[in-house]
């Protein structure tokens, strides 16, 4: 009886060992499928026209996503101008004054903002900005900036906490005031880690489409001012994927390939750099 | 805020007030340090302001819907822009059911992945696979949606769903026509999307649990799985918190879901293969085409509802994590 029980326990142990690896395979199969399909279908859509021509009109042959690439760069640029300073300053506050009562509140709200569905953040930008100046780059950038802030501030906070106390003490011992020490010694020492946080935040918003949809709508033309909408690469995928036109669907896969290469590229580089540092 | 410098001197032992050459002189309120602290505090509190404004402005935007329907909006089962009648119950149900399906699939797989990465794999290999799992989390949702339409839906329609229907078709859940897209497809795609984030959180959790627990169990003659189970029961509240965070992600996902769920407004689908709707999906699908102010207001009302549900979910996860941290602190002290 005990023999049988013993045997059963060992069998169970082996079974779990197998199951755990099966789970890993089940989780990674979609990744490889996504990457493979995006590469296979995207690569055939990419040619010179893809990068220099704007969205084709209905029924037009060929065409590209040049306007969407322009729009994505401008929108991310403006979003970073708003989101990065706020994120970095918030990160400084959280790490340097972590004992202040306000810090725990800010940390909680940062987390809530981070977990907020991106389409809700887009609706907020709609009610706040679009109802006043209309669908615009400004509204989309505001929404995307709100998505950047928690990512940048967390990266800044963690980077500043990793700066050795001895370096700060050295600066303070030389008579430097605390705020100068924070900016010119601690933040300077942490600048690479902060920069990777900013890059990850940019990669994240480059792939966001829901908040862009409710703040800019579908726009097929070039940039015409911050109070007007512009095409956005991630949103193009959504618009093109549902269309019945062959060349639009091809453009969707091409856009997906470009986005995935840029976003995963940033992630790979950043993570490799971080790993190097840890060793 | 401004004169909180004394407390900060206590916490950072390297800011010794008496040794500091400026410590004696800093009597005035307007020192560089105080101004800097006040400035960062003001900027940091803007995040609290932003969340407050978010609730307020979504309330403003949905006011005409709230005034017209009130709480009936939550139990209404019609969505008719032409007649101007809006109710969100089917959307809430659709959101809950698709998220539940996603969690049902994602939870065991995430647990398995987290265990494989933290307990079963050699460290070198687990580093590589952790990397892949993290990449999986970085793929944009709209790319998952595109893959869902052109790869996952045909695959499910041709290969997976027919045998399920022919073997389990006697259950109402698995009968009816197969479109490819639908409730089950949306749940499956959501599961694929939330598995990486859930398994990454759980892996970190398992790595952080004290190894003495497992060692003690093994020393008593437990098999590896029995020892791991001891460790998992210790990390239970963390696992629950990770699951709740995954739930929040699944409920808020708009683009990928609207691309594969079929977007049909109905109280209950006829089967798991039938089309349905979620709160986030109707926003992605209808918001930009809505013209009637009441329709727009009703959609913003759906957004407000989504925001409130999400806040509740996130705060629950936070509370569980705080309780867990307290409990862990207790064990550490012993």
Image (tube, coloured by chain):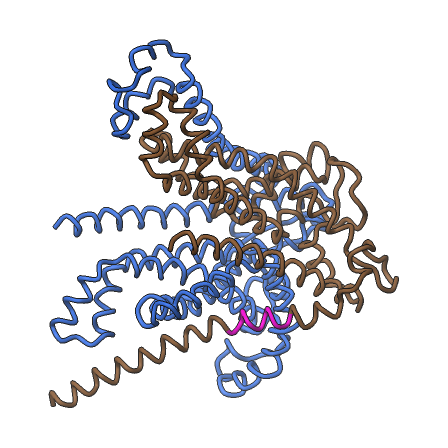
Chain colours: A brown, B blue
Viewer-proximal residue, A136 or B314?
A136
The image position of residue B231, as x and y in percent, is 23, 64
Q: Quadrant of residue B226?
A: bottom left
Residue that extends furthest to the right in the rendered view of this protein: A60
- Above/below status of A22 relative to B310: below
- Above/below status of B4 relative to A33: above
The image position of residue B320, as x and y in percent, is 31, 50
Residue A207 in the figure: left or right of residue B198: right
Where does the C terminus of chain A fall, quadrant-wise?
bottom left
- Above/below status of A120 relative to B108: above
Magenta span: chief secondary structure = helix
The image position of residue B271, as x and y in percent, is 54, 73
Residue B142 in the figure: left or right of residue B22: right
Residue B51, magenta (yes or no): no
- Above/below status of B6 relative to B279: above
Residue at the (65%, 69%) spot, across then down: A39
Viewer-proximal residue, A76 or A183?
A183
Residue at the (62%, 51%) spot, across then down: A206
Residue stretch rendered in magenta on the structure: A29-37
The image position of residue A130, as x and y in percent, is 68, 37
Q: Quadrant of residue A234?
A: bottom right
Residue A35, magenta (yes or no): yes
Residue B193 in the figure: left or right of residue A11: right
Viewer-proximal residue, A83 or B93?
A83
Residue B244 in the figure: left or right of residue A232: left
Viewer-proximal residue, A67 or B312?
A67
């Amino acid at each position: 009886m005990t023999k049988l029980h013993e045997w059963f326990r060992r069998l169970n142990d082996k079974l779990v060992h197998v199951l755990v690896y099966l789970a890993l395979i089940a989780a990674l199969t979609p990744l490889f499928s996504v990457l493979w399909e995006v590469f296979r279908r995207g690569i055939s859509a990419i040619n010179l026209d893809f990068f220099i021509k704007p969205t084709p009109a209905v029924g037009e042959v060929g065409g590209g996503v040049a306007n969407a690439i322009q729009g994505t760069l401008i929108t991310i640029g403006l979003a970073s101008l708003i989101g990065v300073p706020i994120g970095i300053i918030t990160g400084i506050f959280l790490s340097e004054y972590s004992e202040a009562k306000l810090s725990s509140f800010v940390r909680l709200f940062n987390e809530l903002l981070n977990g907020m569905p991106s389409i809700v953040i887009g609706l907020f930008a709609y009610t706040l900005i679009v109802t006043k100046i209309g669908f615009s780059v400004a509204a989309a950038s505001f929404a995307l900036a709100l998505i950047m802030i928690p990512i940048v501030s967390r990266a800044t906070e963690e980077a500043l906490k990793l700066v050795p106390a001895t370096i700060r003490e050295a600066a303070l011992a030389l008579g430097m005031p605390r705020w100068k020490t924070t900016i010119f010694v601690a933040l300077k020492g942490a600048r690479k880690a902060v920069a990777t946080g900013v890059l990850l935040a940019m990669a994240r918003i480059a792939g966001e489409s829901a908040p862009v949809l409710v703040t800019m709508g579908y726009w097929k033309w070039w940039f015409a001012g911050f109070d007007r909408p512009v095409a956005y690469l991630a949103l193009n995928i959504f618009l093109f994927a549902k269309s019945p036109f062959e060349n639009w669907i091809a453009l969707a896969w091409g856009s997906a390939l470009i986005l995935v290469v840029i976003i995963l590229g940033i992630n790979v580089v950043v993570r490799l750099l971080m790993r190097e540092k840890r060793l | 805020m401004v004169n909180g410098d004394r407390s900060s001197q206590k916490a950072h032992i390297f800011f010794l007030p008496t040794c500091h050459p400026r410590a004696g002189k800093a009597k005035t309120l307007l020192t560089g340090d105080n101004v800097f602290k006040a400035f960062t505090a003001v900027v940091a509190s803007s995040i609290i302001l932003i969340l407050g404004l978010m609730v307020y402005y979504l309330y403003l935007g949905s006011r005409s819907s709230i005034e017209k329907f009130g709480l009936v909006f939550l139990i209404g089962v019609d969505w008719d822009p032409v007649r101007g009648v809006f109710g969100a119950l089917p959307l809430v149900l659709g959101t809950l059911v698709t998220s539940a399906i996603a969690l049902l699939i994602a939870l065991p797989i995430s647990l398995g992945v987290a265990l494989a990465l933290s307990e079963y794999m050699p460290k070198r290999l687990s580093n590589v696979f952790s990397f892949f799992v993290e990449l999986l989390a970085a793929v944009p949702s709209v790319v998952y949606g595109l893959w869902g339409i052109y790869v996952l839906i045909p695959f499910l329609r041709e290969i997976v769903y027919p045998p399920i229907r022919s073997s389990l078709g006697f259950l109402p859940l698995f009968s009816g026509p197969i479109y490819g897209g639908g409730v089950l497809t949306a749940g499956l795609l959501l599961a694929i999307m939330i598995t990486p984030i859930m398994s990454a959180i759980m892996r970190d959790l398992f790595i952080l649990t004290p190894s003495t627990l497992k060692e003690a169990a093994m020393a008593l003659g437990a098999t590896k799985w029995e020892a791991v189970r001891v460790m998992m029961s210790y990390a239970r509240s963390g696992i629950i918190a990770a699951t709740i965070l995954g739930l929040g992600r699944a409920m808020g996902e708009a683009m990928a879901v609207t691309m594969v769920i079929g977007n049909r407004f109905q109280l209950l689908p006829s089967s798991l293969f039938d089309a349905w709707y979620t709160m986030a999906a109707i926003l992605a699908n209808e918001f930009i085409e809505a013209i009637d102010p009441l329709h727009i207001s009703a959609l913003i009302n759906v957004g407000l509802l989504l925001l409130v549900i999400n806040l509740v979910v996130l705060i629950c996860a936070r509370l569980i994590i705080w309780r867990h941290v307290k409990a862990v602190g207790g064990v550490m002290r012993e």
